[in-house]
Image (cartoon, grey):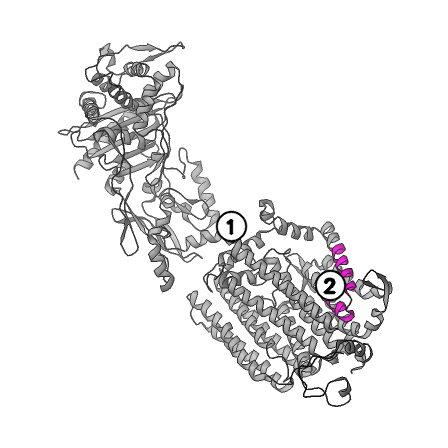
Amino acid sequence: MSDILTTPKSRRNAELLLLILALAVGVGANALAGLDQDKGFSRDFYVQSLTLAILVLAVHVVLRFRAKYADPVMLPIVAVLNGLGLAMIQRLDVAMDPPTTAAARQLMWTGIAAAVAIAVILLLKDHRVLRRFTYISLIISAALLILPLLPGVGMELNGARIWVNLGFATFQPGEIAKITLAIFFAGYLSTNRDLILLAGKKIGPLQLPRWRDMGPMLAAWLVSIGVLIFQRDLGSAILFFGMFMAMIYVATSRVSWVLIGLVMIAVGGFMAFKLFPHVTARIDGWLNAFDPDVYNRAGGSHQIVQGLFGLASGGLTGTGLGQGRPDLVTFANSDMIITALGEELGLIGVSAIVLLYLLLVSRGIRTALGTRDAFGKLLATGLSFTLALQCFVVIGGVTRLIPLTGLTTPFMAAGGSSLLANWLIVALLLLISHAARRPAPPAGLAGTHPPAGRPGRRRDSEQARLAAGAGEGEQR
Amino acid sequence: MNQAIRSTWMVAVAMFALLFGALTVVQFFQADNLNANDWNSRTLYKDFDINRGAILVGGDPIAESVPSSDGFAFQRKYTDAELYAPLTGFYSLVYGATQLESAMNDQLSGSGNELLYDRIVRLFSGAQVEGASVELTIDPKLQQLAWDLLPDGVKGSIVVMEPKTGNILAMVSKPSFDPNKLAGHSSEKVVSNMANLEEVPGLSPFLNPATESLVAPGSVFKLVDTAAALESGKYNADSVLDNPAELKLPGTNVSLPNYVNGGCSARTKADFSFALEQSCNTPFAQIAWDLGEDAIAKQAEKFGFGQSFNIPVNVTASQFPTGMSKDLLAQAAIGQYDVRVTPLQVAMMTSAIANDGKLMKPNLIRTVRAPDLRVLQSPKPEQLQQSLSADHARQISQWMVNAVDRGIARNAAIPGVQVAGKTGTAELLAGSAGNNSWFTGFAPADNPQAVVSIVIQDVDLPTGSQLTSPNAKQLLEAVLNK
């Protein structure tokens, strides 16, 4: 197993400094939006700012005690994104007639999400524990995905059947399922990669897997298709399958898996386009967005075109927070929050936000590179790639790069399940990064690690590959 | 494994690179196109959040923006709405802007070039954009009087204009409408109000009838024939014209009669004065035959026919048909057949006669002022063209004075004042009982202060003549007594 080592330094003070900057941005945005809407510093503003500050500082303190080597950049990025999202949701609340209260709900969910993240860091301590729950995770994933389909529990909203009613709020179990699925894939693949690695036929330079090893991939494909058919959720289907493809590729290092996956996507996508009207409509609304018939049709391209108008009116520098009309776009505070931010912060502002996501994903990938166990590597890659894919699907959708699907922008969009799931992802990544960056365990495993005091050294990759086959599954 | 992780990262970076590209395309390269898209209500909403300048008459606003709390910062409000509706037009979320609201939009919304400096100052001070205000040349008392003289239920227009400057002092039309009904911010209400307005007979809420409706002029067109005759050099004040009781129209089996109830039958030979006083038809038909279609058309153009222009609201071009056979030319010469004029056109040709042949450009704008009351525009009188020589203009004025003194326009006479006038009656389609009744004239003849042109559409003869010359008298008196 290859390692990339950094000097084991805590970096918590750097995190604190970045957190203060992050809070300044989030709270500042909220203040500016309030001032521009002639609302000034209302009670809402103080409650939101204080709650946000207390929550992220609490996570920071917990990290100091329980995971002090964790990556210092992730939490500040999450704080900025969550703060900016909250400011925009609050700003849109005020603009609505009558005013809505989405920001209060979002603040409550931020609290729940941060609390769950703290609980995970405190209780889990080490991500490798999760490997024990590989198959339990599979069962939980299946349960979470079936839940919305059950009569009485599940409910349909805006054409997608992905919600359950909790009484006090609605919840999208699929958001949590992407984490449990990642845990299952990571556990399964890290255990069985030796088997999967046994090669089948060779076509040119392409090393094809054996037919019998196609099982897991076929299963993942069927799950995605199932989500597409029964829940009518194109975005989640893409997300699940993309995550699995990334993870099986990382587990095997074989491009053939990716090619097979792409073929399966093409087949599934074509079938979906031909068979399911809701998919056909999405594609049509994407290709012919400016066709008057498509624009005026219910569920047509009205939403995406209005979003484009919002982005365009922001231009390079934006209208300024509180000065645009992002409220004209349907679902401005959830699915379309990127267009709201693009309108008021401009290309410059929204690019900064996208850059933050890229940075977060990169830190996650860096964690995967640095961690010592295959399970951790797979999990960190899977979770990070999921974040990247989600950004791509959602921002690509609103900019008409790809068809618009109903995914949420991580940390920013109004929606409790998404917020909770993404905070959980970050909690897991923080734990894995703690494992990756802390000083190497002294006993037992010393042989597989270079001596301390030679930081930043990369082991020879050939040796790594040899080591990988043998020691991988036995680290715990 | 790490190599694969790195490749995965590369894929993620590539996806983000695509996102940056897509955002740049939408927010930078396509932004102008998207902002100009017809479906983009943002541009409209932006306009409706501006404190739009007022339109003023005699210092009082007839259209102004008042603070609103329905999601828009301001609501357009019209005072004396029906009286001024054809001038102001409306400013509607659903139907856009019309008339002055549209023609003066750059100034009213503060986006005109003159207001560039104000916009830059505001950019830094953060103050709200405010539009310029537009003061009209309209005299509110005259406008109200003209309105009151037009009874409800008739279709007609009155234009009062200063011949020396082209300034319009009054311009009213009936039926009218309340633009407040179209300026609301609830689309549903506005659409249903518009549907109701379109049911009103004779009303088109998008048009100003005085500048945009084309009407048969009838005998007031004889002023064009007279001018053409004098300008041709073939005729002069002493010319003797044939005045048969009726004229056989070649190629047809109908003849063109003189006005039955008039005094034309008294003479079979007439001079211009008599022909205009009694509004005889046959002499002018023969003049047209003599001079030819082109000569009449050319004189009509010199009076402003065939041109559309902006005062600053749009004025439709009046029409004189071409390529006519002799029988049709005879009818066109007396303002029938396909001759069509706007009420403003008739006021224009009258004012050219009143102003020694000089045709001034009609104008509605007195001043445009920035929010700090700085004057941005105050249009100077502008001569459009010389319509006829000063001598001929004075000659025609004299004949028009005779028409009021002892002719069929005598109801316009004001004791002690020389009033010049010409009436007209255009028969509408054969079989319809209605006529268009006209009066156009000015006073005093030796130093004209105002031109008054009145048209009452689709009425019977007695009502028509009652609503034209006597009303002109009252309006001219009001101008002179000021």
Give the image quarter of residue A369: bottom right
Residue sitting farthest toward the left: B416
For label 2, the SS is: helix
The answer to whether B466 appears left or right of B127 in the picture is: left
Q: Is residue A467 magenta?
A: no
Q: Residue sitting at 57 percent across and 68 percent down?
A: A355
Q: Is residue B332 visible?
A: yes
Span highlighted in magenta in the image:
A245-268
Which kind of residue does numbered mark 1 sit on?
A: Asn
**Placement of the C terminus of chain A among the 4 image quadrants:** bottom right
Residue sitting farthest toward the bottom: A443
Where residue B280 appears, as percent x and y from the top left, is 27, 16
Where residue A6 appears, as percent x and y from the top left, is 65, 82
Are discs 1 and 2 both within one chain?
A: no
Up the image or down, B407 lies above or below A322; here it is above
Give the image quarter of residue A104: bottom right
Q: Is residue A264 magenta?
A: yes
Where residue A35 appears, as percent x and y from the top left, is 43, 68
Query: What residue does disc 2 label?
Result: A241
**Placement of the N terminus of chain A among the 4 image quadrants:** bottom right
Where residue A359 appears, as percent x and y from the top left, is 60, 71
Which secondary structure is most common in the magenta stretch?
helix
Quote the CA–CA distance across marks 1 and 2.
Answer: 37 Å
Q: Residue sitting at 54 percent across and 80 percent down?
A: A54
